[in-house]
Image (cartoon, rainbow, N blue to C red):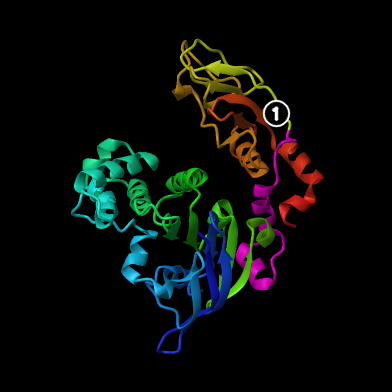
Amino acid sequence: MAIEFQGVTKKYPDGTVAVDDLSLTVEDGTITVFVGPSGCGKTTSLRMINRMVEPTSGTVLLDGKDIRESDPALLRRGIGYVIQHAGLFPHRTVLDNVATVPLLSGGNKAQARARANELLETVGLPAGLGKRYPAQLSGGQQQRVGVARALAADSPVLLMDEPFSAVDPVVREELQDELLRLQSQLGKTIVFVTHDIDEAVRLGDRIAVLRVGGKLAQYGTPSEVLRQPVDDFVSSFVGRDRGYRGLSFLAADEVRVDEIPLVRVGDDAASSDTEWLLAVNAEGKPRGWLAPKSTVDGVLSEEHLLPGGSLYQQGTPVRGALDAALSSPASKGVVVDDQGRAIGVVTARQVLDVIEKHPQGVGE
């Protein structure tokens, strides 16, 4: 379901212009990210889609229909909405929080709870959490519940207002991964607000960069915004390291993957005098590095190991390969398959050799 802004302006009685003549189309089944500094009208633009904010002028179309022709309450009930801190009802259990929308839509309690259980599983939460209250969950778990509740509307449209900004970076990355996984399955039309250009680049099919005063500065794919910023404002907002961010769009297929000596946690093992050894568990998944000349008495345990840095999944962009190599104590990035099993290593030099062959792919 496409969303179209046609010359939309929001001006408040004190003269403040929050959104100024916004025109763009959010394509059906895509993630469009509104990004920009504080005061640029990101959230105001988002809230005009579900009529939580009414435009002063212009038109917002949902699937070709003017949203002003819809009753605001019915419109909101049919659009998923996720906000920062999840916005859960503290006095209701997790299950009842998620069941709220199905109940409002006319389902009985048993049906609503059954649907809520399905949605908790969809967002990667165990059914046992359904009996808990929001205060008994971690921040990341609360945000997953918020996403589940938004999906309960079973709407083709999902609005997300800085939903992951209040959690720590590790959990934030997990939630971003979860959103991308869900989108690959569900194909919603998602409008996502963030102030973080890295998050915008990672999640967006298209990015709308807004400047203070609610003016649209640039609208395009992440690659276009990084490689071809239209003016100094966009260039400054994207940052001087946009070339590094541009590595997200360069495939790592040409990066050579080398073999690496392996040792297994739980086996008798001796270190090498000259080489770093990669330690894996019984499933072949990396657990850490055994440094040269390490002392191992008997069975190798994880206490003997140094953390392995980030992992790089084969077939993903070259930025991940470079991150893995640079964060590894052995200066070798561990390459894993889609099951998380180690299949080899890459060095930063090998990655840079590929980047140098494709300078146009890094945004500079």
Extent of the magenta region: 227-255
The x, y position of residue 219, in whole percent, is: 62, 66
The x, y position of residue 161, in whole percent, is: 43, 62
In the image, farthest residue toward the bottom: 14
Residue located beneath label 1 in the image: 257
Give the answer, above or below, for where 145 lies relative to 40: above
Q: Residue at x 62, y 41 (%)?
A: 320
Give the answer, above or below, for where 55 lies relative to 34: below
* Residue 290 appearing in the image: no
Does the magenta segment cover residue 29?
no
Query: Can you tell which quarter of the image residue 128 is in?
Result: top left
Q: Which residue type does callout 1 highlight? A: Val
Query: Can you tell which quarter of the image residue 343 is in?
Result: top right
The x, y position of residue 73, in whole percent, is: 31, 68
Q: Residue at x 50, y 70 (%)?
A: 61
Q: Please, what secondary structure does the residue beneath circle 1 have?
A: loop
The x, y position of residue 6, in whole percent, is: 55, 75
Does the magenta segment cover residue 232?
yes
Residue 122 or residue 334, whichever sits in front: 122
Compared across the picture, whether 82 is left or right of 328 comes to left
* Residue 61 appearing in the image: yes
Label 1: how many residues lie within 10 Å, few (<14), some (14-19) or many (20+)? some
Compared across the picture, whether 319 is left or right of 364 comes to left
In the image, farthest residue toward the right: 357
Give the answer, above or below, for where 283 lies relative to 346: above
Tell me the quadrant of the picture where the C terminus can be found. Answer: bottom right
